[in-house]
Image (cartoon, coloured by chain):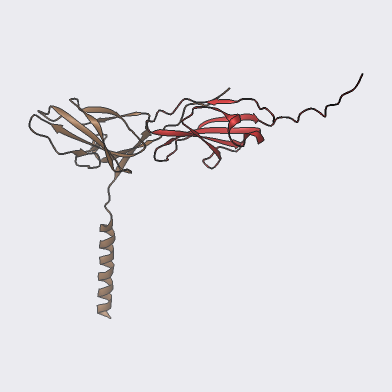
Amino acid sequence: MAKVKDMILTFPPSGSPDVVGYMLYIQIAPDPITYDSESFDLGLNTTIDIATLPGMTTKDDIYNMGVTAVDEAGNESSFSLINDVPLDFVAPDPPGPLSFISG
Amino acid sequence: MVMSKVRLVLLILLLLYSSVNAFESKDYVTFFGRTDQHVTISWNQVSSATMYEVRAYHNEQEIYFWVGSTTNPEIIYQLPKSGHYTFMVRAVGDTWETTWCTSIDPVCATVDGNPRAWWAYGYVAPPGPIVIE
């Protein structure tokens, strides 16, 4: 089991009073983020370790990222964006094979 | 033949009348904003009024929100959720209260000082800027 480095994403919460959660969207750069991009439900968390999100251990590329606020009716805000984020959660192969060389 | 033409003309007139009357035409001004912002609603003073009561109607969910009561001819309000809102105000005196003046009634609503129906739409505000550590 390889170990991947933490990558913490944070953002200030929306100021709207009826927000029930946040969505994170990612898209391989340079394609722009859309509401159809790969997404993750963050709940009400505004700090998240990206490495722990499902499927992240296969990501190794440059990504555009966006977060939205979701209200109780299911409406989503516009995006808060950050572009050209290098994500690399693919650990290298372990060294080996180990050999014992007797002196 | 003549009767057929008359019938056709009558039918067309009837259809035109029906289509014109099928929908009510109103020219609304829509104010767009975000629900993390505040809106200011103002109105003319009513003589001998002791206060004013204001409420908002959320059109999508068909519910009223109590905006507040005030002695001033204006009130500041943060939209509680996304959607279209119409606003209503009435004056209250010692022993009386007026009917509600509604923002979608151009008889008592104005935009830039001119009689005009209006409502407001509030969007969900996005989160703040992303930081990655």
Front residue (pair A41, A30) = A41
In percent of width and height, residue A101 lies at: 89, 23
Q: Is residue B110 visible?
A: yes
* Residue at screen point 9% across, 34% down: B96
Residue B47 position by quadrant: top left
Residue A26 as seen in the image, left or right of residue B73: right
Residue A58 position by quadrant: top right
Residue B75 position by quadrant: top left
Colour of chain A in the rendered structure image: red
* Residue at screen point 29% across, 45% down: B27
- Of all chains in the rendering, the one displayed in brown is B
Quick one: quadrant of the N terminus of chain A? top right
Q: Residue furthest top?
A: A103
Residue A17 as seen in the image, left or right of residue B107: right
In percent of width and height, residue B57 lies at: 27, 39
* Residue at screen point 25% across, 70% down: B10
In percent of width and height, residue A84 lies at: 61, 30
State the count of labels. 0
Front residue (pair A95, B99) = A95
Q: Residue furthest left?
A: B95
Front residue (pair A59, A30) = A59
Say above or below: B86 vs B94. Answer: below
Say above or below: B82 vs B24. Answer: above
Q: Is residue A59 visible?
A: no
In percent of width and height, residue A68 lies at: 48, 34
Q: Residue furthest right?
A: A103
Q: Residue furthest bottom?
A: B1
Quick one: quadrant of the C terminus of chain A? top right
